[in-house]
Amino acid sequence: MCLLSLSLVLSSCSSSDDEPENTGQNTDIRKLRQLTIAEVPITRATLTEQSSVISAEWKENDEATYFNLSSFSNSIIDRGNLKASSSSPTSSFTGGVVCTQGDQIALIYPFVSIDETSSSTRGTFTIDLSGQTGTLADIATKYHYVYGVGEVNSVTETTANAFISSMQPLLAVAKFTFKDGSNAIPVKKLSIGYADATYEYEEMGYPLTGTVNPFKKDNNITTIVPVEDICVTVATPSDAPLTIDFGNETSGAVYAALFPVSNQLFHFTVTNNAGTYTGTATATLKAGKYYPVNLKLSKQ
């Protein structure tokens, strides 16, 4: 009886070893994980002109914003920063992200602040085109806005992986040179605004800021809505133009990042040591496109 009782006790104890071990792993919970977005392609970041096109590379440690579109609500905004791992046309981006399997993660470059101040603008971000210095390097660093969405396709307790197939540029880039007849016009200061024929082509100002809502798309394209709207009837002569001030004259080209528009009449004013030159031109600008433009202006 004693031997039988001992055998039962031993059998009872050893049976617990056969049960599955509780590892504490729970990958269904949305939590902070180290996310890697592999091989993110770039349309433009470090910009290099090659004839009539622009080539691009990421730069190591380029900082972008992540925004979890899946967890967004009236009380939650999961966002932060990710960094490029290498200097190349494609690079992985890594950083801490609050996510779980299947989450849609927006990647926005350069780093932006996601609005959480009011119900009408919550979840949007703003593009500000003021302060441009007229160089390609300046646009690459501060005004080359690109956007993409990837899906978290695998997670562990502490890590996650996602993939983005493409990044969408949000702005157009123009390269301006100016002539008075056949003579090149050096540029000390350039002002770009909309124009309206009803005001004798007077400069009507320019919408310097635009709001991007990642949740509102037109044909799967994330759209930008300038604060003043892309409409010449909204801008007035008292509105500020987009101004690029070199301080000293430059005989080189002037580069500008601009909002996409369709069939828009623009007004240009160039100031240099010899005086002031003005002119107008109608343009359609598409996001992600590069426009080398030579304009003829008239001296005032």
Image: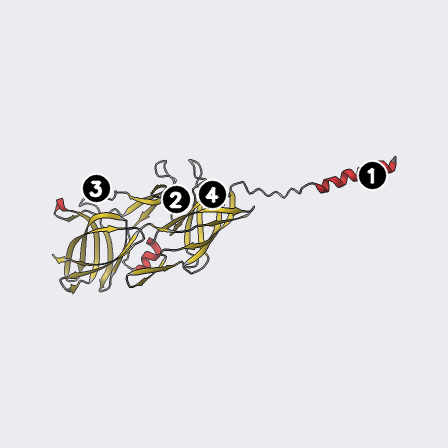
Which quadrant of the view contains residue 116?
A: top left
Name the residue at 80% across, 40% down: 10
Upstream in sequence: badge 3 or badge 1: 1
| Image quarter (top left, top right, bottom left or bottom right) of the N terminus | top right
Determine contact: label 1, label 4, CB under 8 Å.
Answer: no
Tell me the crowding category of disc 4: few under 14, some 14 to 19, or many 20 or more residues within 10 angstroms, Cα based: some
Numbered disc in front, either 3 or 1: 1
**In this orientation, does residue 289 appear?**
yes
User: Residue under circle 4?
Assistant: 103
Q: Amino acid at mark 1?
A: Ser
**Callout 2: SS:** loop
Query: How far, Cα to Cα, is label 1 from label 2?
Result: 66 Å
User: Residue under circle 1?
Assistant: 7
Name the residue at 57% across, 42% down: 26
Name the residue at 71% across, 42% down: 18
Query: How far, Cα to Cα, is label 3 from label 1?
Result: 91 Å
Upstream in sequence: badge 1 or badge 2: 1
Query: How far, Cα to Cα, is label 1 from label 4?
Result: 52 Å
Query: Where residue 114 is drawn, which disc sits there?
Result: 2
Which quadrant of the view contains residue 296?
A: bottom left
